[in-house]
Amino acid sequence: MENKVYLTRDEVPRQWYNIVADLKTPVKPPLGPDGKPIGPEQLAAVFPMNIIEQEVCQDRWIDIPEEVLEILYRWRPTPLRRATYLEQHLKTPARIYYKDESVSPAGSHKPNTAVPQAWYNKQFGIKRLTTETGAGQWGSALAFACNLVGLECKIFMVRVSFDQKPFRKTLMRIWGGNCVASPSNETQAGRAILKEFPNTPGSLGIAISEAIEQAVGDKTGQTRYSLGSVLNHVMLHQTIIGLESKKQLEKFGEKMPDIVIGCAGGGSNFAGISFPFVCDKIHGKKIDIIATEPKACPTMTRGAYHYDHGDIAGLTPLLAMYTLGHKFIPEPIHAGGLRYHGMAPLVSHVICDGLVTPRAYDQLTCFEAAETFAKTEGFVCAPETSHAIAGAIDEAVKAREEGKKKVILFNYSGHGLLDLMGYEKFLNGELKNYELPQAKLDESLDQILHFPEVK
Amino acid sequence: MENKVYLTRDEVPRQWYNIVADLKTPVKPPLGPDGKPIGPEQLAAVFPMNIIEQEVCQDRWIDIPEEVLEILYRWRPTPLRRATYLEQHLKTPARIYYKDESVSPAGSHKPNTAVPQAWYNKQFGIKRLTTETGAGQWGSALAFACNLVGLECKIFMVRVSFDQKPFRKTLMRIWGGNCVASPSNETQAGRAILKEFPNTPGSLGIAISEAIEQAVGDKTGQTRYSLGSVLNHVMLHQTIIGLESKKQLEKFGEKMPDIVIGCAGGGSNFAGISFPFVCDKIHGKKIDIIATEPKACPTMTRGAYHYDHGDIAGLTPLLAMYTLGHKFIPEPIHAGGLRYHGMAPLVSHVICDGLVTPRAYDQLTCFEAAETFAKTEGFVCAPETSHAIAGAIDEAVKAREEGKKKVILFNYSGHGLLDLMGYEKFLNGELKNYELPQAKLDESLDQILHFPEVK
């Protein structure tokens, strides 16, 4: 019996799926500082107009440019694997499938949007992209994409990660990216912080400020900024994951999954695997769609659905989303990609509409799930991905208890080969769980009460 | 046009290819301390008899046990990829294919033999395997295999790597392997060294001594030793690489490669990709088969074809092989897997018979080749693998100069995600080339003159 299914080049999806076209309730627009919806032109200094158009597009299907497909085709279509060995270990009647996005050169799903973003910028005449990165997953993906498209790439990497996790920085350098520690001396924002706090470990909020400042500050107009999650066009680009999965499930002889699971930090890998199935659910199919997150950063399960900034510094427009408050700093769990205070507006939207169910897991449960997976399937997952595996294991055990032959699909969003320090600490018994105290949450949410409510 | 070809489960080879059956000259047997060929029973304390039988087997085809196939099938068949983007970059009329062995959970070809070795030991009633590892590629592969088969795994890891490269050790731990720094306090050999040199960085020679001592010292008879390269049965297990490649080349519409390339340290990945094609060459096909190695450790290009020990301490039988002398310590190049003084007797044999041509590259040329590959194909290779890529690029450039549409196949033996320190140093301009001085080589070879010559 086959335990993995590929697709031929001809079977690769040639269009992205835009869930906006199928939502039953209107999309909530981003708001400016005055509380009024912002227009495309207000973003033109930050993003190229072709991407802004995609951000607000209402069409259900959007063609993937041939040149973008050509680059994606270096590693796509990615395999859909059946976790037969995990099933046997769990003694479950469920059939568990996982979409393996770890096979990209950067090791995660991130290049799925890095490549089209770089390509659209190039088409628009842009010469250089700036971005921020935390642990380096997104920065390495964008460096990879810029190298292939022919753009310069400047990455502001949070100081503490720059020093402690040197190897994703090395990946960026191999692909020609210019990665500097943030705060840096290259921007006003960076210099101001360094003057006040010379020994700061940095933060994503600072790094975003530096990247945006350099993009909008280039008077030649040849620089733009790029974001790896949260925004509508990023969700759109990631839908290739779910679209491929659908075709591959069919090849496995499955009509439709009963359960679809992805972890969600900013929301992009979750949207990628799930939105094509959310479409089926909107049109009447019965599917449980589960977004998993860490209990240390429980944006979807305990946050407010409220307008809030996407960054700590408050530079972005106000977005309608589940949020813990834009000044919330999560505890240092190893799933760095899930340490985000907000959630993509489109993912927040489908949660609010009851189409997606969020669920939170603690850190040790997730590392235990990752260890079980590594000892059965063989592969060592990213700490973020372990949250999807924890969800899949829970559902498979439930199927066993109920005696139901459920079909479970989850997104294997990345490998853990550059995150082994977290495993080492887990195996040493040095990791702990973090549950967010209610008082800390209330305090953080208080800071956003003056922003508009989502209606 | 497809740029990668997979195989279905039914197409996976079900037999290994044993080149011994096709050699025109007799295999040179290993010799004991007395200079006489050693019999199987003399190895019985070190290896289980079913593996010893395979080591001396003359049959052309050997069935792969179903249970072994079931485990290999977690990641096999591996993709054969066409390097179209590298071809375009080089403006070559050559068609370049690479067999991607980096997709295994351990990240290299090593599990191809770790799995059957663990399985045969388990069949023989063994409970525990010991081995040594340098940088950790082999140790992690054996831990992975032992976990799936149900054996304990004890790995002696060279102290300096244990401290400097902690992450392959973490992989071993995830898969349940017990990895200790060598020299350790657990063996007489280790204690003796520690007493004399308490701050020694360790060596493969010491680690081998410790692993063998623990295996033969287990009076219950339930422990054996496992080796990741050099021996005939290891070469045998790796031939699945070349056998799959043949079927995949056919699917690409290619009849036969003109050139087959692999890097060679102990020889196992090279034998894996090449021996099925060496068979074709023996039977009259015109194929250039090239084994690449570092100039810092030029075993095949400058060593002697002579009887010598496989380890520095002189614990192994005398093997007929290309060697730099068993006490040779190569300079610290980053391709740790190619820092071996000897070469597998079967690989040495086909070189001596003129079937395989060795070629040496220096370190910077190889890192440049790796960088070119990463910037065109996207993937970041292991430092060892970069020696195969350097060879492939040279041949592709030659094909361009000659205007010939050559078909080049090389083995992409592993990824470089746990070797990024080497890339960092390369990008910093901190790496240098090492050419072995003739005087040092002569001195090293002098030490083996008293061993029997190969006739």
Image (cartoon, coloured by chain):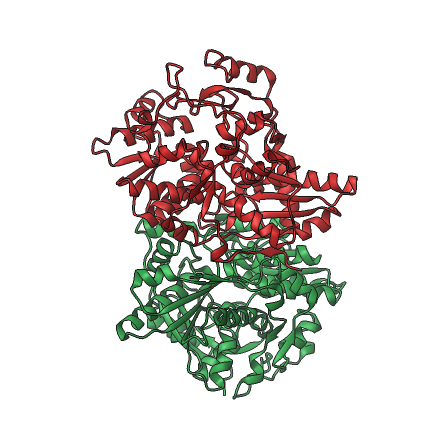
Chain colours: A green, B red
Q: Position of residue B259 (x, y in %)?
A: 65, 40
Quarter location, residue A49? bottom right
Please indicate whether residue B124 sits to the left or right of residue B438 in the image. left
In the image, B204 versus B182, the foreground residue is B204
Q: Position of residue B54 (x, y in %)?
A: 39, 35
Query: Does the image show residue A191?
Result: no
Image: A20 above or below B48: below
Image: A148 above or below B167: below
Please indicate whether residue B8 sits to the left or right of residue B219 in the image. right
Q: Where is residue B337 in the image (x, y as percent from the top left)?
A: 50, 35
Quarter location, residue B353? top right
Identity of the residue furthest to the left in this view = B220
Please indicate whether residue A259 sits to the left or right of residue B218 in the image. right
In the image, A244 versus A30, the foreground residue is A244
Identity of the residue furthest to the top in this view = B450
In the image, A435 versus A69, the foreground residue is A69
How many numbered marks are there? Answer: 0
In the image, B114 versus B241, the foreground residue is B241
Q: In which quarter of the image is the N terminus of chain B?
A: bottom right
| Residue at the image position 55 percent from the left and 80 percent from the top | A19
Query: Does the image show residue A208?
Result: yes
| Residue at the image position 51 percent from the left and 61 percent from the top | A79
| Residue at the image position 58 percent from the left and 42 percent from the top | B423
Q: Position of residue B173 (x, y in %)?
A: 35, 46
| Residue at the image position 36 percent from the left and 56 percent from the top | A376
